[in-house]
Amino acid sequence: MSIPNRLIDEKSPYLLQHAYNPVDWYPWGEEAFNRANEEDKPIFLSIGYSTCHWCHVMEHESFMNPQVAELMNDAFINIKVDREERPDIDGVYMAVSQMLTGGGGWPLTIIMTPEKKPFYAATYIPRETSYGRIGMLDLVPQIKNYWVNQRERLESISENVVLNLGQGRGGDEDVPEKVFDTAFMLLDDLYDDKHGGFGTAPKFPTPHNLLYLLRYWKRTGTPKALAMVEKTLKEMKQGGIYDHIGYGFHRYSTDQEWLVPHFEKMLYDQAMLLMAYTEAYLATKKQEYRKTAEEIIAYVLRDLTSPDGGFYSAEDADSEGEEGKFYVWSTTELETILSGEEYNAIIEQYNLRPKGNYLDEASRRKTGKNILYLTEEAMENEILVQAKNKIFEARETRIRPLLDDKILADWNGLMIAALSKAGNAFGVKEYIEEAVRAAEFILGKMWDESTLLHRFREDEAGITGFLNDYAFLTWGLIELYHATHEERYLETAIRLNQSILDKFSDPRGGFYFTAEDAETLLTRRKEIYDGAIPSGNSVAFYNLQRLSRLSGETEYEAKARKSSNYFSSSLLGQPHAYSMFLVGLDFAFGPSTEIVLTGKPVELSKITRRLSEEYLPNAITHVWSQELADKIPYLAEIKPTDTPLIYVCKGFVCSLPTDSIEKALEIIYEKSRETT
């Protein structure tokens, strides 16, 4: 094996994948930038992540190629960044890519001055020039020539990029309630009536859109909103984007029909989709949504869970150098695994063909392999169950895709929230226990009561946390509090939220992605767009609304309003692009409901169980205790009772307590009533 480069001492699985490249890679840091200044060289910045298929392709084609590596080492100081470890760097330079090229993606290639000012951006670059796309063998000498002979031109480009990368001016007006109708109409315009989901190919799950549409249906009673959610959830579950053998969802569909996925599996997708299926179950009581949710959980607990309690980040798309190889089957392979009856059942139910049922994305050729997918809801029977179990056992003998075993605080926060929601909704104690284990791991290993760290791997926590880490973990702890009613989770959520206010606030409104004492990059960005995952600002806004009601601290609501006012121009311009922010706005406009239960814990269990079965997205619930009453002013007026009592406050008005859960639900669901 060749001599390793400087990446060999890193913790990131992605950086370690490149540790034996002949490219003289540096990790992001002062050593690289000092060397660039000393040698008067531009910087070649390559950003990706460990389960990125085209990152692997570019590595094998170019970064492992001695000729390309020699050119790069001569012309540049080369830096590798894991976007999942350093989303702050990725966010800034992805914005640069969108500015310079109109698009972005990974691998992300940025060429910049030693002062970190970019003048060139691209995504995947082939080794050799072909079909109008310049290759590395031609690009690197061109850039070197420009750097030596036309540097003023490059520096002019970089100065313009930095100048235009500023935040711009925020808004300063209240967002009107009509924003919900506008967002629905825009999502309806993008909705695919035939296949569900939004847009064409590639098609992403975007579960936060579904969370918003469920609330819009709850708010307005619009049947189409619920129909859009149900169609999308059903079509995704039936498609090849879902792993019908081992469960869990792949990253996205390369086509409009949800058939051919990019095969990587990300923790955040499992978490957000778990929330969507759980809430759809609560809204409709349809068992198929609960079944899918529980299958997602089965996958996560089996394959993405650390023995110590945290959740791993992802599984790769590739195995043995080929995308999807772990997941696809030839009919010949299945004939050797299954009985005749089982084989026929699988072939018919899951649309397998002797010549294969899909085209390779890159070559557009038939591979002879099959993706399992359904054209109608599965009719599970004993034969199919046996067949799928046998296929799963056979698949387990294959070489598995790479597991990215780093534990990220933000993605774990999402999974803690999702498991807490599911455990509460389904009445499954094990799911809540797994959420508790993960929360205790993050709080024990990555939080020192003042600073949250972003990444844990190989017994080491590192990288100061970003807004998403604090906001997503706060969300997780709020859901965990509702599932357990243990005061410490609410208390920690409030402390984390205070850290957000202290470290990330912009006095004008909203929150920066990086803390005030973080490394200085080209700009200090404020993200609001809800992309593959919700933005930190959207979740922080949602948390502020809920914590205001949970704690009685009205200042949180004032901070939230300042945030929505700041982002008002974005929200009014393209509200459907900020669907998670709209989830928080839906809570803010209400009616929201505060529920307080008193009585002996054993007798309250039936009431809490009954409440958890209802779709009440804008409700917060306390089980009264003296400890809570000492800290939350509005609970101090309530006295403990042996007989269970339910206090319901809705729209800032409270009803008399009742001992009847049915009466309490009547109050919660009633739109207009006399109150006391």
Image (cartoon, grey):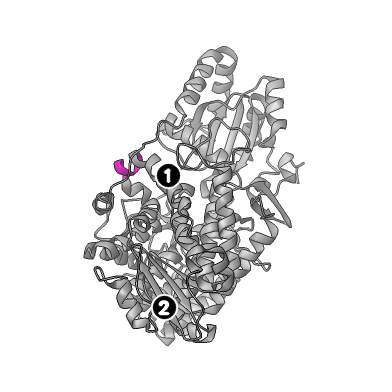
The residue lying toward the viewer, choosing from 35 and 189, is 189
Query: Which mark is first along the chain, 2 or 1?
Result: 1
Residue 533 lies, with reference to residue 103, above or below; the image says below
Instruction: Name the quarter where the C terminus is drawn.
Output: bottom left
Q: Does the CB distance between marks 1 and 2 fall below 8 Å?
A: no
Residue at the disc numbered 1: 563
Q: Position of residue 60 (x, y in %)?
A: 59, 44
Residue at the disc numbered 2: 646
Which residue is found at the position 51% from the left and 68% from the top?
Answer: 636
Asked if residue 655 lies in the magenta stretch, the reply is: no
Residue 44 lies, with reference to residue 364, above or below; the image says above
Q: Position of residue 91 (x, y in %)?
A: 51, 40
Highlighted magenta segment, given as a residue range = 570-574
Q: Position of residue 144 (x, y in %)?
A: 59, 21
Q: Is residue 245 visible?
A: no
Q: Identity of the amino acid at label 1?
A: Ser
Q: Identity of the amino acid at label 2?
A: Ile
Q: CA distance from mark 1 to mark 2?
A: 34 Å
The mark found on residue 439 in the picture is none
Q: Is residue 97 left or right of residue 180?
A: right
